[in-house]
Image (tube, coloured by chain):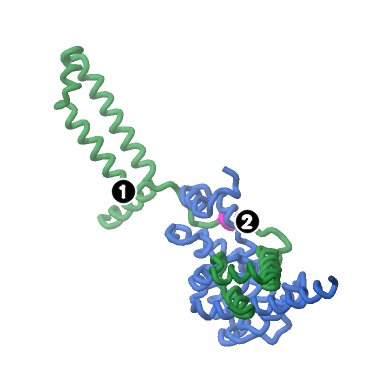
Chain colours: A green, B blue
Amino acid sequence: MKCNKVMERYCSLDAGENVPLGVRLHLLRCPRCSREVQLLDQELLRIKDEFPFQMEHDASDAIMRHVYLSPVHYSRHVSSFKWLFTGIILFAGMMLLPFSQSLSWLNDFYGGRLLFPLHLIMGFLISIYAVIMVGSNLEELKTYVDDKLEKYL
Amino acid sequence: MTVEQVTDEQVVTRVLRGDSESFRIIVERYQQHVYNIGMRFFHREDDAYDFVQEVFLKVFNNLGTYRQKGKFRSWLLKLAYNHGINMIKSSRTEPEFDEFMKPSDAPTPERQHIKGEIEGLLSKEMENLPVKYRVCLDLFFFAGMSFNDISNITDLPVNTIKSHVFRAKRQLRDALRGTMAEEYYEM
Protein backbone atom coordinates (compact mmCIF):
# COMPACT_ATOMS: atom_id res chain seq x y z
CA MET A 1 0.00 0.00 0.00
CA LYS A 2 1.12 3.54 -0.70
CA CYS A 3 1.66 6.03 2.12
CA ASN A 4 -1.31 8.19 1.21
CA LYS A 5 -3.68 5.24 0.99
CA VAL A 6 -2.44 3.90 4.31
CA MET A 7 -3.05 7.22 6.02
CA GLU A 8 -6.52 7.50 4.46
CA ARG A 9 -7.32 4.01 5.71
CA TYR A 10 -5.99 4.91 9.16
CA CYS A 11 -8.09 8.07 9.31
CA SER A 12 -11.25 6.14 8.45
CA LEU A 13 -10.93 3.86 11.49
CA ASP A 14 -13.65 3.87 14.11
CA ALA A 15 -12.94 4.65 17.78
CA GLY A 16 -11.24 1.62 19.30
CA GLU A 17 -11.16 -0.28 15.99
CA ASN A 18 -8.19 -2.58 15.37
CA VAL A 19 -5.65 -1.35 12.84
CA PRO A 20 -5.77 -3.60 9.74
CA LEU A 21 -2.79 -5.85 9.16
CA GLY A 22 -1.82 -4.20 5.84
CA VAL A 23 -1.68 -0.79 7.52
CA ARG A 24 0.31 -2.17 10.44
CA LEU A 25 2.87 -3.77 8.16
CA HIS A 26 3.28 -0.52 6.27
CA LEU A 27 3.75 1.41 9.50
CA LEU A 28 6.51 -0.98 10.53
CA ARG A 29 8.38 -0.28 7.32
CA CYS A 30 7.68 3.44 6.87
CA PRO A 31 9.10 5.77 9.58
CA ARG A 32 7.36 8.85 8.15
CA CYS A 33 3.84 7.33 8.27
CA SER A 34 4.65 5.79 11.63
CA ARG A 35 5.56 9.23 13.02
CA GLU A 36 2.43 10.74 11.46
CA VAL A 37 0.22 8.10 13.06
CA GLN A 38 2.00 8.54 16.39
CA LEU A 39 1.38 12.30 16.33
CA LEU A 40 -2.24 11.86 15.28
CA ASP A 41 -2.88 9.32 18.04
CA GLN A 42 -1.21 11.57 20.60
CA GLU A 43 -3.39 14.49 19.62
CA LEU A 44 -6.58 12.43 19.58
CA LEU A 45 -5.74 11.06 23.01
CA ARG A 46 -4.91 14.52 24.32
CA ILE A 47 -8.18 16.11 23.21
CA LYS A 48 -10.30 13.19 24.47
CA ASP A 49 -12.38 14.30 27.50
CA GLU A 50 -11.26 17.91 26.83
CA PHE A 51 -14.58 19.18 25.61
CA PRO A 52 -14.54 22.44 23.64
CA PHE A 53 -16.95 23.98 26.14
CA GLN A 54 -15.86 23.59 29.73
CA MET A 55 -18.36 24.12 32.54
CA GLU A 56 -17.35 26.97 34.80
CA HIS A 57 -19.18 25.58 37.80
CA ASP A 58 -20.45 22.22 38.92
CA ALA A 59 -24.21 21.85 38.37
CA SER A 60 -24.63 18.65 40.38
CA ASP A 61 -25.96 20.31 43.58
CA ALA A 62 -28.63 22.24 41.67
CA ILE A 63 -29.61 19.10 39.75
CA MET A 64 -29.81 16.99 42.90
CA ARG A 65 -32.08 19.62 44.52
CA HIS A 66 -34.46 19.23 41.56
CA VAL A 67 -34.18 15.45 41.79
CA TYR A 68 -35.20 15.46 45.48
CA LEU A 69 -38.16 17.70 44.67
CA SER A 70 -39.24 15.47 41.81
CA PRO A 71 -42.58 13.69 42.27
CA VAL A 72 -40.94 10.49 40.99
CA HIS A 73 -39.60 8.21 43.74
CA TYR A 74 -38.06 4.83 43.22
CA SER A 75 -38.11 1.97 45.69
CA ARG A 76 -37.20 -1.70 45.65
CA HIS A 77 -40.19 -3.36 44.05
CA VAL A 78 -40.97 -7.05 44.26
CA SER A 79 -43.21 -8.18 41.42
CA SER A 80 -46.68 -9.62 42.09
CA PHE A 81 -45.52 -12.88 40.57
CA LYS A 82 -42.75 -13.21 43.17
CA TRP A 83 -45.18 -12.44 46.00
CA LEU A 84 -47.68 -14.98 44.67
CA PHE A 85 -44.99 -17.62 44.13
CA THR A 86 -43.64 -17.20 47.67
CA GLY A 87 -47.17 -17.33 49.08
CA ILE A 88 -47.97 -20.54 47.20
CA ILE A 89 -44.71 -22.19 48.35
CA LEU A 90 -45.41 -21.19 51.97
CA PHE A 91 -49.00 -22.37 51.83
CA ALA A 92 -48.15 -25.64 50.03
CA GLY A 93 -45.39 -26.31 52.58
CA MET A 94 -47.84 -25.95 55.44
CA MET A 95 -50.48 -28.10 53.74
CA LEU A 96 -47.98 -30.86 53.02
CA LEU A 97 -46.39 -30.78 56.48
CA PRO A 98 -48.81 -33.38 58.02
CA PHE A 99 -47.73 -35.84 55.32
CA SER A 100 -44.00 -35.47 55.90
CA GLN A 101 -41.99 -38.21 57.57
CA SER A 102 -40.15 -35.72 59.78
CA LEU A 103 -43.41 -34.59 61.34
CA SER A 104 -44.56 -38.12 62.03
CA TRP A 105 -41.17 -38.86 63.61
CA LEU A 106 -41.41 -35.72 65.77
CA ASN A 107 -44.97 -36.68 66.62
CA ASP A 108 -43.84 -40.11 67.77
CA PHE A 109 -41.10 -38.56 69.86
CA TYR A 110 -42.94 -35.60 71.43
CA GLY A 111 -46.55 -36.73 71.11
CA GLY A 112 -49.47 -34.27 70.83
CA ARG A 113 -47.53 -31.54 72.68
CA LEU A 114 -45.83 -30.55 69.43
CA LEU A 115 -48.99 -29.56 67.53
CA PHE A 116 -49.77 -26.36 69.42
CA PRO A 117 -46.30 -24.70 69.05
CA LEU A 118 -46.16 -25.89 65.44
CA HIS A 119 -49.43 -24.15 64.63
CA LEU A 120 -48.21 -21.07 66.43
CA ILE A 121 -45.05 -20.98 64.29
CA MET A 122 -47.04 -21.46 61.07
CA GLY A 123 -49.46 -18.71 62.06
CA PHE A 124 -46.52 -16.44 62.88
CA LEU A 125 -44.93 -17.13 59.48
CA ILE A 126 -48.19 -16.42 57.64
CA SER A 127 -48.62 -13.17 59.60
CA ILE A 128 -45.06 -12.05 58.82
CA TYR A 129 -45.57 -12.78 55.12
CA ALA A 130 -48.89 -10.89 55.07
CA VAL A 131 -47.46 -7.88 56.94
CA ILE A 132 -44.46 -7.55 54.63
CA MET A 133 -46.58 -8.00 51.50
CA VAL A 134 -49.18 -5.43 52.55
CA GLY A 135 -46.49 -3.04 53.85
CA SER A 136 -44.51 -3.05 50.64
CA ASN A 137 -47.57 -2.75 48.41
CA LEU A 138 -49.45 -0.27 50.57
CA GLU A 139 -49.73 2.40 47.87
CA GLU A 140 -51.09 -0.03 45.26
CA LEU A 141 -53.43 -1.57 47.80
CA LYS A 142 -54.71 1.85 48.85
CA THR A 143 -55.34 2.84 45.24
CA TYR A 144 -57.09 -0.47 44.57
CA VAL A 145 -59.35 -0.13 47.64
CA ASP A 146 -60.12 3.53 46.82
CA ASP A 147 -61.07 2.57 43.26
CA LYS A 148 -63.36 -0.21 44.50
CA LEU A 149 -64.96 2.07 47.10
CA GLU A 150 -65.56 4.79 44.51
CA LYS A 151 -67.25 2.23 42.29
CA TYR A 152 -69.64 1.06 45.00
CA LEU A 153 -70.39 4.39 46.66
CA MET B 1 -15.54 -0.70 45.27
CA THR B 2 -14.72 2.96 44.56
CA VAL B 3 -17.06 5.36 42.76
CA GLU B 4 -14.88 5.16 39.62
CA GLN B 5 -15.20 1.38 39.51
CA VAL B 6 -18.99 1.33 39.70
CA THR B 7 -20.56 1.02 36.25
CA ASP B 8 -23.38 3.28 35.11
CA GLU B 9 -25.74 0.32 35.03
CA GLN B 10 -24.95 -0.55 38.66
CA VAL B 11 -25.61 3.05 39.67
CA VAL B 12 -28.95 2.98 37.83
CA THR B 13 -29.92 -0.20 39.67
CA ARG B 14 -29.10 1.50 42.99
CA VAL B 15 -31.21 4.54 42.10
CA LEU B 16 -34.13 2.35 41.02
CA ARG B 17 -33.93 0.61 44.41
CA GLY B 18 -34.50 3.92 46.14
CA ASP B 19 -30.96 5.29 46.60
CA SER B 20 -31.58 8.65 44.88
CA GLU B 21 -28.26 10.09 46.13
CA SER B 22 -26.42 7.67 43.81
CA PHE B 23 -27.84 9.66 40.92
CA ARG B 24 -25.20 12.28 41.77
CA ILE B 25 -22.57 9.87 40.35
CA ILE B 26 -24.35 9.91 36.99
CA VAL B 27 -24.64 13.70 37.09
CA GLU B 28 -20.95 14.16 37.91
CA ARG B 29 -19.92 11.75 35.16
CA TYR B 30 -21.99 13.21 32.36
CA GLN B 31 -22.77 16.86 33.11
CA GLN B 32 -19.85 17.96 30.94
CA HIS B 33 -21.08 15.85 27.99
CA VAL B 34 -24.60 17.24 28.29
CA TYR B 35 -23.36 20.81 28.76
CA ASN B 36 -21.38 20.47 25.57
CA ILE B 37 -24.46 19.35 23.64
CA GLY B 38 -26.35 22.28 25.19
CA MET B 39 -23.68 24.75 24.08
CA ARG B 40 -23.76 23.33 20.55
CA PHE B 41 -27.52 23.82 20.41
CA PHE B 42 -28.02 27.12 22.20
CA HIS B 43 -24.63 28.89 22.10
CA ARG B 44 -25.30 30.53 25.46
CA GLU B 45 -23.91 29.41 28.80
CA ASP B 46 -27.07 30.18 30.79
CA ASP B 47 -29.21 28.23 28.35
CA ALA B 48 -26.74 25.36 28.37
CA TYR B 49 -26.85 25.20 32.20
CA ASP B 50 -30.66 25.19 32.12
CA PHE B 51 -30.49 22.49 29.48
CA VAL B 52 -28.21 20.36 31.70
CA GLN B 53 -30.68 20.62 34.59
CA GLU B 54 -33.68 19.79 32.44
CA VAL B 55 -31.95 16.81 30.83
CA PHE B 56 -30.85 15.26 34.12
CA LEU B 57 -34.27 15.74 35.66
CA LYS B 58 -35.78 14.07 32.61
CA VAL B 59 -33.25 11.25 32.88
CA PHE B 60 -34.16 10.73 36.56
CA ASN B 61 -37.89 10.78 35.86
CA ASN B 62 -37.55 8.32 32.97
CA LEU B 63 -35.01 6.02 34.59
CA GLY B 64 -37.70 3.36 35.03
CA THR B 65 -38.03 3.08 31.24
CA TYR B 66 -34.31 2.38 30.72
CA ARG B 67 -33.84 -1.24 29.70
CA GLN B 68 -30.39 -2.39 30.70
CA LYS B 69 -29.69 -3.96 27.30
CA GLY B 70 -27.89 -0.97 25.76
CA LYS B 71 -25.24 1.27 27.24
CA PHE B 72 -26.60 3.78 29.71
CA ARG B 73 -24.31 6.49 28.35
CA SER B 74 -25.85 6.17 24.87
CA TRP B 75 -29.37 6.21 26.33
CA LEU B 76 -28.62 9.36 28.34
CA LEU B 77 -26.96 11.20 25.45
CA LYS B 78 -29.76 10.22 23.07
CA LEU B 79 -32.24 11.67 25.52
CA ALA B 80 -30.15 14.87 25.75
CA TYR B 81 -29.81 15.14 21.98
CA ASN B 82 -33.54 14.61 21.38
CA HIS B 83 -34.40 17.08 24.13
CA GLY B 84 -32.15 19.66 22.46
CA ILE B 85 -33.76 19.09 19.06
CA ASN B 86 -37.27 19.32 20.56
CA MET B 87 -36.38 22.54 22.35
CA ILE B 88 -35.01 24.07 19.14
CA LYS B 89 -38.14 22.97 17.27
CA SER B 90 -40.56 24.32 19.86
CA SER B 91 -38.73 27.57 20.66
CA ARG B 92 -39.92 30.59 18.77
CA THR B 93 -37.03 32.79 19.77
CA GLU B 94 -34.38 30.34 18.63
CA PRO B 95 -33.57 29.82 14.94
CA GLU B 96 -36.03 27.67 13.03
CA PHE B 97 -35.30 23.97 12.79
CA ASP B 98 -34.23 24.35 9.15
CA GLU B 99 -31.69 26.90 10.29
CA PHE B 100 -30.41 24.30 12.71
CA MET B 101 -29.63 22.13 9.72
CA LYS B 102 -27.47 24.82 8.09
CA PRO B 103 -24.01 25.92 9.12
CA SER B 104 -24.24 28.88 11.45
CA ASP B 105 -23.03 32.29 10.22
CA ALA B 106 -22.98 33.74 13.72
CA PRO B 107 -19.62 34.09 15.49
CA THR B 108 -19.29 30.67 17.04
CA PRO B 109 -18.54 30.30 20.74
CA GLU B 110 -16.00 27.61 19.79
CA ARG B 111 -13.64 30.40 18.80
CA GLN B 112 -13.81 31.86 22.28
CA HIS B 113 -13.10 28.50 23.87
CA ILE B 114 -10.21 27.40 21.73
CA LYS B 115 -7.48 26.11 23.95
CA GLY B 116 -4.94 24.96 21.43
CA GLU B 117 -4.02 24.85 17.81
CA ILE B 118 -5.47 21.42 17.20
CA GLU B 119 -8.77 22.24 18.91
CA GLY B 120 -8.74 25.34 16.75
CA LEU B 121 -8.41 23.26 13.63
CA LEU B 122 -11.21 20.98 14.74
CA SER B 123 -13.39 23.99 15.50
CA LYS B 124 -12.62 25.41 12.07
CA GLU B 125 -13.68 22.14 10.47
CA MET B 126 -16.83 22.14 12.60
CA GLU B 127 -17.77 25.69 11.67
CA ASN B 128 -18.48 24.53 8.13
CA LEU B 129 -20.90 21.90 9.36
CA PRO B 130 -24.58 22.01 10.32
CA VAL B 131 -25.01 22.06 14.10
CA LYS B 132 -26.20 18.47 14.38
CA TYR B 133 -23.02 17.17 12.74
CA ARG B 134 -20.91 19.19 15.14
CA VAL B 135 -22.48 17.16 17.94
CA CYS B 136 -21.37 14.00 16.10
CA LEU B 137 -17.77 15.22 15.93
CA ASP B 138 -17.88 16.14 19.62
CA LEU B 139 -19.13 12.68 20.49
CA PHE B 140 -16.40 11.06 18.42
CA PHE B 141 -13.39 13.18 19.30
CA PHE B 142 -14.14 14.32 22.83
CA ALA B 143 -16.37 11.54 24.19
CA GLY B 144 -14.59 8.71 22.32
CA MET B 145 -17.81 7.15 21.03
CA SER B 146 -18.01 4.76 18.07
CA PHE B 147 -19.79 5.49 14.77
CA ASN B 148 -22.58 3.07 15.67
CA ASP B 149 -23.16 4.61 19.09
CA ILE B 150 -23.25 8.11 17.58
CA SER B 151 -25.66 6.89 14.91
CA ASN B 152 -27.92 5.41 17.61
CA ILE B 153 -27.92 8.70 19.48
CA THR B 154 -28.44 11.05 16.56
CA ASP B 155 -30.32 8.77 14.14
CA LEU B 156 -27.91 9.90 11.40
CA PRO B 157 -26.52 7.31 8.97
CA VAL B 158 -23.21 5.74 10.01
CA ASN B 159 -21.62 6.59 6.66
CA THR B 160 -22.47 10.28 6.99
CA ILE B 161 -20.91 10.41 10.46
CA LYS B 162 -17.92 8.44 9.19
CA SER B 163 -17.29 10.84 6.33
CA HIS B 164 -17.44 13.92 8.59
CA VAL B 165 -15.09 12.32 11.09
CA PHE B 166 -12.80 11.29 8.27
CA ARG B 167 -12.66 14.86 6.93
CA ALA B 168 -11.91 16.26 10.37
CA LYS B 169 -9.16 13.69 10.93
CA ARG B 170 -7.66 14.54 7.57
CA GLN B 171 -7.59 18.20 8.58
CA LEU B 172 -5.79 17.24 11.76
CA ARG B 173 -3.38 15.09 9.83
CA ASP B 174 -2.58 17.93 7.43
CA ALA B 175 -1.96 20.23 10.37
CA LEU B 176 0.28 17.68 12.05
CA ARG B 177 2.23 17.30 8.82
CA GLY B 178 3.16 20.95 9.26
CA THR B 179 4.36 20.15 12.78
CA MET B 180 6.38 17.26 11.38
CA ALA B 181 7.92 19.47 8.72
CA GLU B 182 8.96 21.88 11.49
CA GLU B 183 10.50 18.99 13.42
CA TYR B 184 12.55 17.95 10.40
CA TYR B 185 13.54 21.58 9.79
CA GLU B 186 14.75 21.91 13.39
CA MET B 187 16.78 18.73 13.02
Residue type for callout 2: Glu
Distance between the Cα atoms at labels 2 and 1?
A: 35 Å
Magenta run includes residue A62 = yes
Query: Is residue B156 visible in the rendered structure shown here?
Result: no
- Which residue is depicted at the point 59% across and 83% down? B100
Question: Residue B165 location, x and y as percent?
Answer: 60, 76
- Which residue is depicted at the point 69% across and 70% down? A31
**The label number, if any, that marks residue A80 in the structure image:** 1
**The label number, if any, that marks residue B28 in the structure image:** 2
Mark 1 crowd level (few <14, some 14–19, many ≥20, 10 Å Cα) = few
Magenta part mainly helix, strand or loop?
helix
- Does label 1 lie on the same chain as label 2? no
Q: Nearer the viewer, mark 2 or mark 1?
A: 2
The N terminus of chain A: image quadrant: bottom right
Q: What kind of element bears circle 2?
A: helix
Q: Which residues are magenta?
A: A61-69
Question: Residue A62 location, x and y as percent?
Answer: 64, 58
Question: Residue B59 location, x and y as percent?
Answer: 52, 62
